């Protein structure tokens, strides 16, 4: 998987970027939040990336921070939310605003995101609250606490890895859910999930 890109920013055509890494140009999709933070053309940029493989395409998504990438990975696991809509959400709301909207069931706030209707907004609230619920119950519902929780969860990391390998988010969630609850090593979880699919 490609987890980070460091290179020269060659083109900036929202939502696409072209980054030159030692003569190889990488086409990267990014949210407007990330694009606003980037320097001008010709400067060196560092992007945390999410690599997605499908039958008919390979896509690379870039983020200015690990925080934003972590939330992107959570968003694409929500039923009906693809990478493009996830980028739209992150372009319209910063991580803190998104977390607050979910915690406080601000459906109206979420429907202001292009492409997000009322039903999708309600689904976002229900499914994201479930995924981020632990931090909320501990009164740690802040951007940093939530992201730290997600990044520290090996099962979440394993699911993200399976999605990057080409499995659908729902399939990855089911695969990991079937594994022993006491397994806490990300690499072991991935191997066990892939092995179970071959049976």
Image: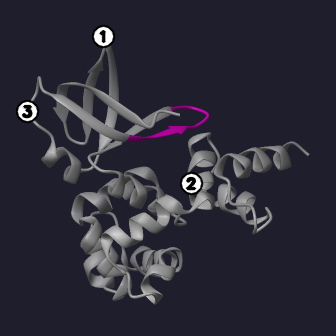
Residue at 79% x, 61% y: name it. 179
Q: Tell me the SS state at disc 1.
A: loop
Residue at the far right: name it. 199
Q: Which residues are magenta?
A: 49-57
Residue at which label 1 appears: 23
Compared across the picture, whether 172 is left or right of 119 comes to: right
The picture places residue 22, in percent across and down from the top left corner, at 31, 13
Residue at 61% x, 34% y: name it. 55
Q: Which mark is residue 172?
A: none
Residue at 38% x, 52% y: name it. 69
Q: Tell me the SS state at disc 3.
A: loop
Compared across the picture, whether 155 is left or right of 49 comes to: right
Residue at which label 3 appears: 40
Residue at which label 2 appears: 157
Q: Is residue 106 above or below residue 111?
A: below
| Front residue of 31 and 82 | 31
The span from disc 1 to disc 2 (Cα, nearest Å) is 31 Å
Q: Nearer the viewer, mark 2 or mark 3?
A: 2
Q: Is residue 160 above or below residue 57?
A: below
Q: Is residue 181 above or below residue 57?
A: below
The picture places residue 170, in percent across and down from the top left corner, at 64, 60
The picture places residue 191, in percent across and down from the top left corner, at 75, 44
């Amino acid at each position: 998987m490609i987890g980070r890109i460091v290179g020269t920013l060659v083109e900036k055509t929202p939502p696409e970027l072209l980054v030159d890494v030692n003569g190889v140009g990488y086409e990267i999709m990014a949210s407007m939040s990330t694009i606003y933070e980037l320097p001008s053309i010709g400067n060196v940029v560092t992007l945390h990336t999410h690599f997605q493989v499908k039958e008919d395409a390979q896509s690379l998504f870039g983020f200015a921070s690990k925080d934003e990438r972590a939330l992107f990975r959570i968003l694409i696991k929500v039923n009906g939310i693809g990478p493009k809509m996830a980028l739209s959400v992150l372009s319209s709301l910063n991580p803190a605003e998104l977390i607050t909207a979910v915690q406080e069931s601000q459906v109206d706030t979420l429907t202001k995101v292009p492409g997000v209707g009322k039903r999708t907004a309600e689904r976002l609230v229900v499914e994201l609250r479930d995924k981020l619920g632990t931090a909320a119950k501990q009164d740690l519902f802040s951007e940093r606490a939530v992201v730290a929780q997600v990044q520290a969860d090996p099962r979440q990391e394993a699911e993200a890895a399976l999605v990057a390998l080409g499995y659908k988010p729902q399939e990855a969630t089911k695969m990991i859910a079937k594994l022993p609850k006491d397994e806490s090593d990300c690499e072991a979880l991935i191997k066990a999930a892939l092995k179970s699919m071959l049976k």
